[in-house]
Image (cartoon, grey):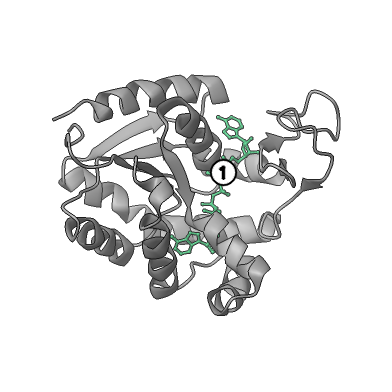
Amino acid sequence: MGADKNTRPVLILLGPPGAGKGTQARRLEERFGLVQLSTGDLLRAAVAAGTEAGRAAKAVMEAGGLVSDQIVLDILADRLAEPDVAGGVILDGFPRTTVQAEALDEMLAAHGERVTGAISMEVDDAAMVERIAGRFTCGACGEGYHDSFKPTAVEGVCDACGGTEMKRRADDKAETVAARLEAYHAQTAPLIGYYEGKGLLDRVDAMGDIDAVTEALVVLVERLREPA
Ligand code: AP5
């Protein structure tokens, strides 16, 4: 499956919490000039801004459940219409339910567009808890780190921007991670079959180190971006 010449690439990264969707989306964004669009980031921004959607999403996110399809779809539709994403997007954390996947297909079809490809990042649940528990990000630029797998070169100082305020997510506690994994298996994993059935699915072993996973993804994305 390749990209249509006249429409923007719409790539989907599927995978459980901690699979590395955000880490890899940021790398692919730089490499291919696409824009990472994370519904988790959009929802956290709505929570921080105290919007109506953010107030509705806050408790659900803190409990590790999925926010309602309608809230997520409204937020995503607005973001997809902004001019900076006209060159193509990497969807990170969306879609997460069959309702969202079908709505995305309709949203794109209304503009003569379609999903270019979906990549399933395959990992073991046990490793995900360790990945998430050690995760932190720079409060200034959002660069992601891990206590063991990707520490900052100088403790407490962001390699990318020199920022010194590091943040940990409210939903990264062990009990919440278990609920998030459960939600993934019940509601999101079926999307692997959804995209496979459409001939749009590729799989990547995401248990390797961060650079190895990037290399595998780059090969796939280069292939997907070739005109059909
Ligand atoms: P969201 O923000 O999307 O979180 P998530 O899917 O749970 O995924 P994470 O961000 O935890 O993990 P990731 O795969 O991006 O891994 P990362 O690269 O950070 O969603 C949060 C909440 O928002 C949801 O629970 C839900 O409530 C709500 N929500 C969001 N979208 C929604 C939707 N569409 N519908 C309904 N609700 C929605 O990596 C993790 C750590 O591991 C990092 O420290 C990283 O450095 C490290 N790492 C990454 N790759 C590797 C590797 N290969 N080896 C070793 N370490 C690695």
Compare residues 223 and 6 and report the one nearer the observer.
6
Compare residues 168 and 46 and report the one nearer the observer.
46
Quadrant in which residue 158 is drawn: top right
Residue 75 percent across, percent down from the top left = 44, 66
Residue 92 percent across, percent down from the top left = 45, 47
Quadrant in which residue 63 is drawn: bottom right
Disc 1 on helix, strand or loop? loop
Q: Residue at x 65, y 69 (%)?
A: 49
Residue 25 percent across, percent down from the top left = 48, 37
Picture layout, residue 49 above or below residue 149: below
Q: Give the total number of marks visible in the rendering.
A: 1
Q: Residue at x 31, y 23 (%)?
A: 222
Under 8 Å from ligand 1: the CB of mark 1? Answer: yes
Side of 186 relative to 139 (left or right): left
What amino acid is found at the position of numbered circle 1 in the picture? Gly
Q: Which residue is mark 1?
A: 18
Residue 187 percent across, percent down from the top left = 38, 61
Q: Residue at x 39, y 74 (%)?
A: 70
Side of 116 relative to 59 (left or right): left
Quadrant in which residue 95 is drawn: bottom left
